[in-house]
Each structure stands twice: as structure tokens, then as C-alpha cells.
Image: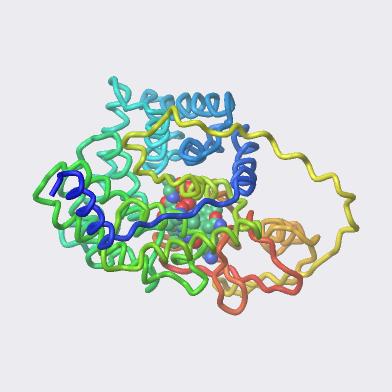
Amino acid sequence: MEPLKALLLLSGVLGALAELCVVPPIHSQLVEKLGQHLLPWMDRISSEQLNPSIYVGLRLSSLQAGTKEDLYLHSLKLNYQQCLLGSASSNDNSDCQTKFSAGHLALYLLALRANCEFVQSRKGDRLVSQLKWFLEDEKKAIGHNHEGHPHSSYYQYSLSILALCVHQKRVHDSVVGKLLYAIEHDHHVRQGHLSVDTEAMAGLAFTCLERFVFNPDLRPRITMAIDKVREKILKAQTPEGNFGNIYSTPLALQFLMTSPASGVELGTACIKARASLQASIQDGAFQNPLMISQLLPVLNHKTYLDLDFPDCQAPRVMLVPAVEDSSPAHIPEVISVTLKVSSVLPPYKQTISVLAGSSLEDVLKMAQNIGGFTYRTQPSLSGPYLTSVLRKEVGDREFWQLLRDPDTPLLQGIADYKPQNGETIELRLVSW
Ligand code: B12
């Protein structure tokens, strides 16, 4: 048989065995609208508001923001390098250390790769060392017998491995070993629920490690872990098509798109997920810049793994700011929302009046203004994170969970969630 024919036959056989996760294109106008949401966030360049994930998402998308994008990267570099590499003795620096976690540093390294830069020079090496120290520290927190937990989360642990890997920096086998063990034994499962986001991030990290084969002895375990992650994510698909929920679907798809699989209905699952994503985008479910930044690569058939060899010359459509809606404002309607906190003594319950379209954060502000209620937040890449309610601060591995009465956890944070008239929202202190 001619060599070409033999090759075609072989690829045909392999193709029939292995299924690919392909996400069919979504209407370009919808994608542009998502990109437009990011533009105002790119004007916020104070160190607290900078978000390297936005830069990564945009660079892996089909869209570009021209000089705004260059300026944003410049601000990221100024802030991160000054902060992370500043003199350890200065007060400023200790302030920085609390502002930027290892997860932020990992995202910053991904942003550099998104601009086709490798960490080089002494400064770059120090950033890499910081991330490696962080992983060593987390490894110690997990402990020899895997009985502990990372101080941050397995999500940030995986993100850090991924960032080092796309910079082709070796990660110690024992560090990888802890993540393998966690995935093999479901150690990151929280309250019995699988965190699809965490699985997907771990899957992306493993797939990168598999590509670079730092240690061939680990390869079979890594390959098995990738298969296990895929299996669990596919099992977590809902009847609507989401992997986990709508907001974990982008990262899940990023992972599923990186490796073909045989013997599973991967292609069909991804087409179903894409349909659900399209419906949610049309419904306006994607407003949060972090969520958009994880989604945009998927809509451009890209994943964080493309950062190993990014195509920085790929043509991208220039974004233009959205035109303000000038339709006449209608008379504002007042709605009632009941706020309930049972995790404190005495329990708190109060009905608050706010304008329709107000966020949960507006409700909390109003309750605080009325009196008898207090809360505090901390800025994060996803927006304001609720850390204290009625002076009760979260303890180790605790968080203030947001629920719609009676027992439905919200899928959005306080700044994004808009309660409906008559709804009761509970703030509940829980362990994770
Ligand atoms: C780990 C995690 C948690 C942990 C965080 C604790 C910890 N020490 O890590 C726990 C379990 C406590 C948690 C809680 C919540 N989470 Co969460 N979380 C994540 C996850 C998997 C990773 C976040 C991360 O580390 N990012 C990387 C680092 C570098 O960024 P960072 O900004 O520094 O990270 C901090 C914030 O992300 C913050 N955080 C975590 N979750 C959320 C959610 C919101 C809305 C905000 C504002 C902040 C926030 O905690 C991180 C650590 O300090 C993401 C998944 C994802 N796809 O991003 C979901 C994710 C961000 N969480 C989500 C949600 C909905 C929540 C909750 C609102 C759930 C609820 N009903 O109560 C609460 C937050 C409530 C509050 N108090 O404000 C959604 C947000 C979707 C959206 N529309 O924006 C995501 C995408 C998961 C999902 N697929 O549903 N989360």
C-alpha cells in the first residue's frame, strides 16, 4: 500500500476511535458584546482592581483592545513586579504580599505568556521561585499523609503548576504527587459536591505536564488522572448541558478541548454544553469580567494550554465601546427583599425595600444604613467577597454562603446577583 494511503487509513481508524471536543462557533456579535463588557474594567488600573485573568482571556479570544490592551499589560507589570519584587523591608511590600496571592502571581505569569513572553532575567527567576516556594508551603500544609489541606485551595495549587508548566519550569515531582493524590482520592471535594472548576484546572495542569514530560516515570499516573478528571466532568453534565453549573462550564470545556478521548461521547457532550452557553450568554448571564475572561478563549477554540506556544500574530477583531442605551428611563419600581441570618445570635431577619434591579450588595448596604446590620467585604478577581456579617468574621475554611430561601446556593456574588421582588436571601456561615 502507498505510504500516503496507509497514513490516511490509520488516521481514519484513530479518528473513529477518539472523539474530539469541538465547540461550534457562536454568533460573532454575541462574542463582541462579551468583549465590550471587559473594556470598562480595563480602565481600572489601580493595583486592587487589576485582573490578569482579563488580559489572558482577551489575548486568547478573537478580539483585541488595541493600545488599551498594551497599557493594561504595562500596568500589570508595574504593579506585580514592584509589589512582588520590591524590597522586603519596605512596608509597601508587606502590603503587596497580602494583596497578591500566589494565585494572582500564577495568573500574572499566564498573562506574560499570553504576550509570548517567557520569564527571564533575575527578576523573572524570583517570580518563579516565589511560586515554587508557595507550592512547597502548600505541600507541607497538605502533609505527608495527605491529611491536611492547602492554605489556599487545590484550584490555586493547580493554577500555579499550570503557570510554571507553560513557562516550561520544572515542578517538583512531590508537588505534582500531592495533586495526583488529591484527584485520585477526591480530596478537593467540598461538602460532598465535586468542584468542576477545580477538577478542570487540575486537568489543565496535568495535560500541560503530560506534554512536557518532565519525569517520564510520572506519566502513566498523570495520564490516568487526566482520564479520571474527564470522566468526572462528563458525569457532572446537567440535563441542560452544563458541566457542574453554567459558570464552571467554560473551564470544563477548556479542559475537555485539550485532549481527545476514546469510548466516550465527548463530541456530543461538548455540543450540548455549547448550546447551553449560547442560551445563557443571550440571557445576559455573563456580566462578571472574570467569568467572561474564562469563557472568551473557549469561544475562540483556545484554552490556557495554548499559552505553551501562543500565536501572538493571530488576527483579532478590534473592540469598540458599546453604545449607551438611550431608551427613556421608566419609573423606578420598589421591591421588597427579606434578608435572613441564622448563623448568629440573636438571628437576624428584616425586609428591605430597594429599587428593582438592585444587586444583593445594594440590599446589604441598605440594611446597614437602616441599622441593626453590618457586613464587610474583601476585593477579589471575581468582585467583592463577603467576609463578615453582623461582626462575625469567617474562620479557617469557613465562608459566608449566599442562598435563596429555602436552600438554593446562589451562582453569583453579592455585586452580580439581583434579587427579585419577594425573595428571601439567607447568609449562612458554613465550612468548605
Ligand atoms: C475556591 C473557590 C471558592 C472558595 C474560596 C475560598 C478559598 N480560600 O479559596 C469558597 C468555597 C469559599 C467559595 C465561595 C463562593 N463561591 Co467560589 N469559587 C472558587 C473557585 C473554584 C476558585 C477561586 C480562585 O481561587 N481563583 C483564583 C484566585 C487567584 O483569584 P482570587 O480572586 O484571589 O480568588 C478568591 C476569590 O475568587 C474568592 N471567591 C471564591 N468564590 C467567589 C465567588 C464570588 C462571587 C466572589 C466575589 C469571590 C469569590 O475566593 C478566592 C480565594 O480568596 C472559583 C472557580 C472559578 N472558575 O473561578 C469559584 C467561583 C468563583 N465561586 C463561585 C461562587 C458562586 C461562590 C459563592 C458566591 C457561592 C455561594 N452561593 O455562596 C461563594 C462566595 C460567597 C461570598 N462570601 O461572597 C462562582 C462564581 C460565579 C460568578 N457568577 O461569578 C465560581 C466561578 C464557581 C462556580 N462555577 O459556580 N468559592
In the displayed structure, would residue 162 be above or below residue 398? above
In the displayed structure, would residue 134 be above or below residue 309? below
Extreme-left residue of the structure: 217
Q: What colouring style does the render use?
A: rainbow
Residue 309 lies left or right of residue 419; in this view the side is left
x and y percent of residue 300 in the render? 48, 45
Q: Residue at x 29, y 20 (%)?
A: 121
x and y percent of residue 349 in the render? 68, 74
Asked if residue 385 can be seen in this view, the reply is: no
Q: Residue at x 55, y 64 (%)?
A: 411
Asked if residue 122 can be seen in this view, the reply is: yes
Residue 122 lies left or right of residue 72; in this view the side is left
Q: Residue at x 60, y 62 (%)?
A: 279
Residue 194 lies left or right of residue 358; in this view the side is left
x and y percent of residue 60 in the render? 46, 39
Q: Quadrant of residue 44?
A: top right
Extreme-top residue of the structure: 121
Q: Quadrant of the C terminus?
A: bottom left
Extreme-bottom residue of the structure: 406
Residue 86 lies left or right of residue 291; in this view the side is left
Q: Nearer the viewer, residue 5 or 302?
A: 5
